[in-house]
Image (tube, rainbow, N blue to C red):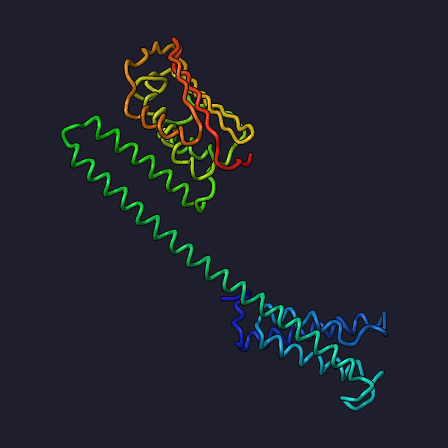
Amino acid sequence: MWPWGLSPGSPRAFAFAATCVAVATVFHISVGTVRPETVVFAPYYAATLVAALLGGAAAGILAMILGGVIAYWLFAQANWDVALFTVNNLDNWVLYGGSSVVILWAAVSYRSLLQWLREEQRKRQLLTDELAHRLGNTLATVQAVVNQSLASETELREKISARLAALAATNDLLFKSDWQTVSLRDILIGEFRPYGSSRIHWEGEDVQCPSQVVMLLALITHELTTNAVKYGALSKPDGRIDVSWQNVDGRLTIHWVESGNLLLTPPTRKGFGTKLLSSAIRRFHGQVETRFEPSGLNCTISLALPDRCRA
């Protein structure tokens, strides 16, 4: 469906072309009362262009012919010979016809390009939707395999299932952004949503993160949030999490600070999640520093973004 429901070659398209010529004629008459020397065909160039753009080539041709006829019979005979084609007025017809053909070609080319772009966008959207559907099914299948394979290891099964759920949620953000960038705030909001916002505060100018690091940031946030629920600030009624970040020259630094007199004990060994994230963040020349203070966990994540983020 084209603008205003005008299909090329339809009666509505031809009616629209006639309307464009009528409007051009009214304009010509109005201007002619002020400036009689107005160029005879000038208003009908615009009529041809608009008719061709919105109604197609046939509508544009109709507007060109109607405009030429009306311009001759209403405005030209006072200055031209009565005969339609003579040596004296041939240059006017050549100029009008040649200019109108160029206008028609440009308008039809633009319409064809626009139609191609719309079709490509439609195909792209179908492929994206199909990819999202298949990826969702794949994650669901992986989760089912994990649940069956680790049926006797409840804690490990729950950890892996939660990580898969975090990846699925992040995939949804990426699909909505057409795999371009995702807001850091959106990643945090998605992870913190189950726990409310009264004890979680963040500060920083929003950053659009490239798709290459969105998964990593989502997993980091998920691991920190999960540990906060089990052992840290979110495990205590008066616990609090403060998240702040800065993006300086393409390097993102995130500060995660938990408080509430948690009296945390530093772990004696690195868990699976810590090892996984430490390994993944090296791809982006990043590092994770954690300090277990009496008030709670203090963690700083720093990594170089593949592309400069937009604040």
Which quadrant, please, contains the C terminus?
top right
Across and down, in percent, residue 40 comes to 79, 76
Q: Give the tally of numbered discs.
A: 0
Vertical side of 100 occupied by 268: above or below: above
Residues 58 and 113: in front is 113
Residue at the location (79% across, 89% down)? 86
Q: Residue furthest left?
A: 152
Vertical side of 61 occupied by 129: above or below: above
Residue 107 left/right relative to 243: right
Vertical side of 175 occupied by 53: above or below: below
- Find residue 188 and report its image quarter: top left
- Find residue 62 and report its image quarter: bottom right
Across and down, in percent, residue 103 comes to 66, 71
Residue at the location (19% across, 39% down)? 145
Residues 270 and 44: in front is 270
- Find residue 165 and report its image quarter: top left
Residues 233 and 117: in front is 117
Across and down, in percent, residue 282 comes to 40, 28
Across and down, in percent, residue 286 comes to 43, 26
Vertical side of 269 occupied by 109: above or below: below
Residue 13 left/right relative to 140: right
Residue at the location (74% across, 73% down)? 26
Q: Residue furthest bottom?
A: 83
Residues 149 and 303: in front is 303
